[in-house]
Structure formats: C-alpha cells, structure tokens
Amino acid sequence: AQTVTQSQPEMSVQEAETVTLSCTYDTSENNYYLFWYKQPPSRQMILVIRQEAYKQQNATENRFSVNFQKAAKSFSLKISDSQLGDTAMYFCAFISNSGYALNFGKGTSLLVTP
Amino acid sequence: GAGVSQSPSNKVTEKGKDVELRCDPISGHTALYWYRQSLGQGLEFLIYFQGNSAPDKSGLPSDRFSAERTGGSVSTLTIQRTQQEDSAVYLCASSPRSGTFDTQYFGPGTRLTVL
C-alpha cells in the first residue's frame, strides 16, 4: 500500500515571502505521478502542480515549484512571493502505475498573512 | 469550458433517510471518480467508472453505498439509511481517459450532514 505523509498540519507565511510544504510517500513502485492540490474554503480542489517520477527535472508552474527527491521519496512544494489568495489547504497526492485512485496526505493548512 | 459540477452543494438529512448526490463530469471525460473527505479519515477513494466498463467499487465503505453512471456521463452516489458517520464532503472528479496518469479534475463537492 502507498502512503502519503504531510508532517505539517498548519503553516503560516507573510505575504511576498517564500514557504515550503513537505510531503513524503512510501511505495515500492518505480513509475508513478505526484501531485499537489489546493483546496480553498470554497472546497474546490485545484491542481497546483504535478511531477512524473521518471523525470529528474523538478516541475515548475509560475510561483510554484517542487523539490522531488526520488531516492528519499520526498516531494515538497515551494511557494514563492506568497499571496493572500494562496491561503488554503494543500494536499499532496500520489498515483501509481498500477492504480487510478489518488492517495492523499492529510493536508497542510496554509495561512498567508498581510 | 465547464468544469465538474455537483449537486446539491449542501445536504442535511436525518439519520436513516436515503440521499442521492449527483455529479456532472467535464464533457468528453470518460473516467469518473468519487472520493469522501471527512475530518477523521481525510480523503478516501470510493468508486471509479471508466466508460462502459464495470465500476471499481472497492472503496465503498458499506453496502449502504452505491453509485451508477448513466450514459457514460452523469453519476449518482446513493447512500441508504444514512448514519451520522456518513457526514462528510463527497467529491467527484473526472479525467479524459483511462490512462493512469491523467490529471483528475474535481468538482466543488457536496457537504452531507446527517443529524
């Protein structure tokens, strides 16, 4: 079974600063995808970024980037120039080559303060 | 284009009643998923539909839960004889095809409260 662990239940960052959210996972699979989803108070889960395990290059989407360490099974999300609209729950998720259901971590609640 | 839609947005029901939750996937998406988000359990997979194939119901927590997908599009999740532990947000997602690595696009969810 695959497990996803987010060790930071809550985090806070000031506007314009940089914050890193941690995620580790456990799997015996070699080919898989990792995702970060954002869930604001509206409840809508929004894809932030995704990473293919076979790609060594870290994915980047505007202010969002990941640090993917395959050997360490670590997948952290860095948010640069934090904005008030980044306030949300952030979920790390894993999907393997042998399945189709996303395995989610428990989430990190991020608060961006003025 | 239009995203995944779900209705109702909120549902309050009494213990023992049946409820139906609806999901309209993104047009053209053949794969549809239901997840449950609760405080104690986080996000759990419930059921998966792909085209006209038999659904994967392995995540359904009990036989009180069932789901169908008509015409390969709209899906309904039914919970019979609701219990208080069924209170949660029920999220629906769709993806373009059956490929494992397709991004799943989520709807806004239905918040179910069982009194």
Image (cartoon, helix red, strand yellow):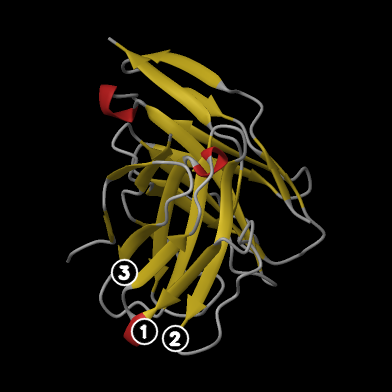
> For the point 38% across and 68% down, which residue is it?
B76
Q: Earlier in the sequence, mark 2 or mark 3?
A: 3
Decide which of A24, B98 is in the foreground and name it: B98
Place of residue B38 in the rendered image (x, y in percent of width and height, measured from the top left): 53, 38
Q: Give the secondary structure at mark 2.
A: loop
Decide which of B114, B50 is in the foreground and name it: B114
Left or right of residue B1: residue A3:
right
Place of residue B31 in the rendered image (x, y in percent of width and height, measured from the top left): 44, 75
Q: Earlier in the sequence, mark 3 or mark 1?
A: 3
- Quarter of the image for residue A75 reads top right
Mark 3 nearby-residue class (10 Å; few <14, some 14–19, many ≥20):
many
Place of residue A63 in the rendered image (x, y in percent of width and height, measured from the top left): 36, 36
Could one spot residue B43 in this view of the protein?
yes
> For the point 50% across and 18% down, which residue is it?
A11
The residue at which mark 1 appears reads as B72
In the rendered view, would you say A49 is above or below B12? Answer: below
Q: Amino acid at mark 3?
A: Pro
Q: Give the secondary structure at mark 3.
A: loop
Asked if labels 3 and 1 share a chain, the reply is yes
The residue at which mark 3 appears reads as B25
Q: Amino acid at mark 2?
A: Gly
**Residue A15, numbered circle:** none
Left or right of residue A48: residue A10:
right
Q: Quadrant of the C terminus of chain A?
A: top left
Q: Earlier in the sequence, mark 2 or mark 1?
A: 2
The residue at which mark 2 appears reads as B51
Alpha carbon of mark 3 to alpha carbon of mark 1: how far? 10 Å
Decide which of B59, B26 is in the foreground and name it: B59
Asked if labels 2 and 3 share a chain, the reply is yes
In the rendered view, would you say B25 is above or below B108? Answer: below
Place of residue A26 in the rendered image (x, y in percent of width and height, measured from the top left): 77, 48
